[in-house]
Amino acid sequence: MARDMFATLASPSVECKWCLWLALMTLTLICATLLAIVDKLIGHRLEAEELNLGRGQDAIKTSITKLTADVDGIGARLDALETRAKTANKPPTAARFEESQDALKKRFESDELRSRQASDAEKEKKNPDRAVEGRRYGSSGSYSMAQPVFDFPTRN
């Protein structure tokens, strides 16, 4: 069969030349189509990889930005702690001393108020007939820290 092809090629007729030319053009067209398909597939794959790389770069940039913000936040906290430590180690000024004394007084007064209210509530539970002034028999109707209406007898 190979001998017949070579013999035909060696002495081709006009019809055979057209058939060979048509076959050669068909093979060229098929090869060109296959090359175009392969080129598109490779191109799509490269684009997809570039996209993935772009997404990866964006993710890395975002991570770096977040880490930078975290580091800045930590730096700000350290600066605040450093400032607090510096002010805490300073001797108290008169104004700061007065502020702390006022705060202690308010705290003591609120603690004292709570303890009085608790003791009044206990007394009222024990003796509901005897009420604290302002709770039941007070004129204003609001609770006041006044003395009880009735004096409790003391044991001798």
Image (cartoon, helix red, strand yellow):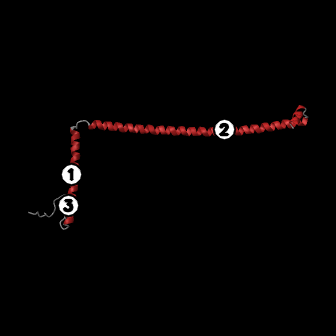
Q: Amino acid at mark 1?
A: Glu
Residue found at the very far top of the displayed protein: 10
Give the quadrant of residue 69.
Answer: top left
Residue on which disc 2 sits: 42
Residue 48: give x, y in percent of width and height.
Answer: 61, 40
Q: CA distance from mark 2 to mark 3?
A: 89 Å
Q: Amino acid at mark 3?
A: Asp
Number of the label disc, if any, that sits on residue 120: 3
Disc 3 vs disc 1: Cβ atoms closer than 8 Å? Answer: no
Question: Which residue is the extreme one toward the bottom?
Answer: 129
2 or 3: mark nearer the eye? 2
Whole-Å distance between the Cαs marked 2 and 1?
Answer: 82 Å
Relative placement, left or right, of 59 versus 143 is: right
Look at 72% across and 38% down and name the residue there: 36
Q: Amino acid at mark 2?
A: Ile
The percent coordinates of residue 146 (x first, y second) are: 17, 58
- In the rendered image, which residue does mark 1 sit on? 109
Q: Pick the quarter of the image with the C terminus.
A: bottom left
Along the polypeptide, which appears first: circle 2 or circle 3? 2
Q: Badge 3: few (under 14), some or many (20 or more) residues near its Cα, within 10 Å? A: some
